Amino acid sequence: MAHRPKRTFRQRRADSSDSDSTQEPFAEPGASGEQADLGPAEEGLPSGGGRAEAAELPRRARGRGRGRVWASSRHAARAAARLDGGSDVPESRAVDLSTDKEDGTHHSSESKDDQSSSSNTSSSLEEEFTSLVNIPDAAFIQAAYRKRELARAQEDYISLDVKHAFTISGMKKNTEYPESETDDHENIIPFTPKPQTLRQKMAEKTATRNEETSEDSEEDKKYQDIWEEQQMRKAIKITKGREIDLSHSSESQTVKKFGASISFPPVNLEIIKKQLNTRLTLLQDTHRSHLREYEKYIEDVKSSKSTIQNLENSSNQVLNFKFYKSMKVYVENLIDCLNEKIINIQEIESAMHALLVKQAMIFMKRRQDELKHESAYLQELSRKAETSTNRSLAIDEKTQWILEEIESRRAQRRQARVLSGNCTHQEGTSSDDELSPADMMDLQKSQGDILQDHKKIFEDVHDDFCNIQNILLKFQQWREKFPCSYYEAFISLCIPKLLNPLIRFQLIDWNPLKFDSIGLKQMPWFTYIEEFIDSSMEESKKENRSDKKILSTVISKTIIPRLTDFVEFIWDPLSTSQTTNLITQSRMILEEHSTCENEVISKGKQDLIKSIVSRMKKAIDDDVFIPLYPMSAVENRMSPHSKFQERQFWSGLKLFRNILLWNELLPEDTLQELGLGKLLNRYLIIALLNAIPGPDVVKKCNQIAACLPEKWFQNSAMRTSIPQLENFIQFLLQSARKLSTSEIRDEVKEIILILVKIKALNQAESFIEEYHLDHLKSVIKEV
């Protein structure tokens, strides 16, 4: 019996051929597995009904559901190999009954228990078969089993090479095999013979004789080699449809084997050289293309880096977002801080303002009370006979105490002037704002308590939220990094509002009426704002920038309201020191910032001017009082009436001088109306008319003329003085006439000089011609 090839079992898809079949490699491309399974049986069928019946089996298989099947027996493989080899001798073919999924019937020979179920189905087919199946005897089966066991012991696979081929339609499972033996190709034992045609019978007999008489192992080895080659081609996944000529002649053709003795075609150096040159050319072309791609990639990398750099320099969205977010958080925290602290600032500011107002009201009320009581006392002296004794004594007691207080303060001032060497001082020109030591201590204590609370307001706040310089630096960074968004956000309008509480905090102890008060330009916040504006003008090339209005807006919103409060409630126009200091502080607002084209600034300036004018009108109405006494009462210059009248005149003249100090800040018509119309013509001229002509009157007139601003008389073509001085000019001419007829003639020249100074040239020339004072014409010509 010939050795059969050792087999390796693996699962097959239902639509492919038997695992051991050799017909799959020889099928045409595109042919299905069912068509390859037809085998020699189909080829050997005649054109009669047998062929139709045999051809019906594959169609049934195609019609049934596809499932998983296992490898067929060795006979099918060998029969296929013979057909491919060109042998005309057909072999018998074992019939496998497929599984019908639709009927639910399974034909198999896997076990003895299945024979009863399959016999019912096979009985209908027995009538179609005309030949009997040759079943090998027990000795043949035992010899085959021993040979397979021996092959298993020697090799790692079961050879499919057999020397004794036999045709069998079904095999019965050998009971002598061990239970562990599972040979599926021998378990399939159909017990019903398949009907065979005459050709099939002849093929089976011829194959049987050939298998019995042929002991040549060379043919079996050929089959084994073909089978191995087919399996190897399947393993390396040869492209489907590739035609491989594996047919060999069974008698004369020698089968090629895979081994060490494979022969190669002769070596041709020209062909190798040509192939190498071709390969080199291809490699060079590939290398050049790779170089071009590499250069392109290098350029792309450079371009990408340049783009990234440009984007980073132009706008980095992440950094921009972080900056804007930090500014948003900073501004929110700053606003929260200021909203919390503004209440404390307002309380401290109100307390300081109330203290200063209280002090100013004390001085004002004391001056008015002293003026009232002193005037009443002098009136009582004029009508002693009309006053009862008891009442006069009561008035005298109260008035006496007030007069003693007044005289005590005057004596202290005289002593201070003597020590300072000031001997030209006139009684009535002092401010009379001295406080008693007890009142002074109380005032200083109250101010100290307020300032102590003032220092505690921002002691728990970081410098970034209470230092004006740090706040402006934050916004300056914004302006430098993102100027467009800075100006689009109107930060120049927001900064004055943010700085308002902090500036008010710094101005709590600022008193513009004191001579030692610091000026606005010397304050730190003023310097910081100027630096912020200057840096804005340097960075920007545009002419009109909103940042330059920050300082003027701060002054309008913060400084002017505070200054207005001082003017309305604290300023005393009769005090020369307070007026001078107030003018110094107001000059920067009213004069230096007059060029700012800002409606808010103009409105703030107008409010300040109105408050100044209103306060001076009130001072003229309430504080100016020049009594008129009989000539007999004022002839004696040491009399109380004469002294009181003199003090009141010089007090009115002092207010006249203080009012005209505003000549460069207030409008001229306003000053002329206040100083000349209401004060000079209504009070001072009347007092001069009732005075005795003499050197004292000329001295007072010189003081009045010295108070008049030179700006009013700078016109060289002017020959007549301003209309408001007409009464004063007439008084001068009247005094000159009286003095010219008396022995005092030197004062006449003084009067002519006063007329020339106030540009009353026509009146002076007329007076000189009238009184033939030719020696005074040179005075007019010098003008």
Image: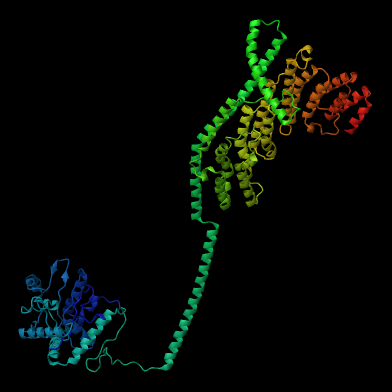
| Image quadrant in which you'd find residue 79 | bottom left
Residue 555 in the image, given as x and y percentages of width and height: 62, 38
From what the image shows, is residue 388 above or below residue 46?
A: above
From what the image shows, is residue 385 above or below residue 600?
A: above
Residue 49 shows up from this direction: yes
How many labels, in total?
0
Please name whichever residue, 717 or 455, is drawn nearer the observer in this view of the structure: 455
From what the image shows, is residue 780 above or below residue 114?
A: above
- The residue that appears at 54% across and 44% down in the rendered structure is 467
Please name whichever residue, 165 or 463, is drawn nearer the observer in this view of the structure: 463
Q: Is residue 611 left or right of residue 683?
A: left
Residue 541 in the image, given as x and y percentages of width and height: 65, 51
Residue 45 shows up from this direction: no
Q: Is residue 762 left or right of residue 689?
A: right
Please name whichever residue, 75 or 493, is drawn nearer the observer in this view of the structure: 493
Q: Is residue 642 left or right of residue 773?
A: left
Q: Is residue 272 left or right of residue 423?
A: left
Residue 728 in the image, given as x and y percentages of width and height: 81, 23
| Image quadrant in which you'd find residue 391 | top right
Quadrant containing the N terminus is bottom left
From what the image shows, is residue 325 above or below residue 414?
A: below
| Image quadrant in which you'd find residue 138 | bottom left
Please name whichever residue, 636 or 300, is drawn nearer the observer in this view of the structure: 636
Residue 144 in the image, given as x and y percentages of width and height: 10, 85
Quadrant containing the C terminus is top right
Q: How is the image coloured?
A: rainbow
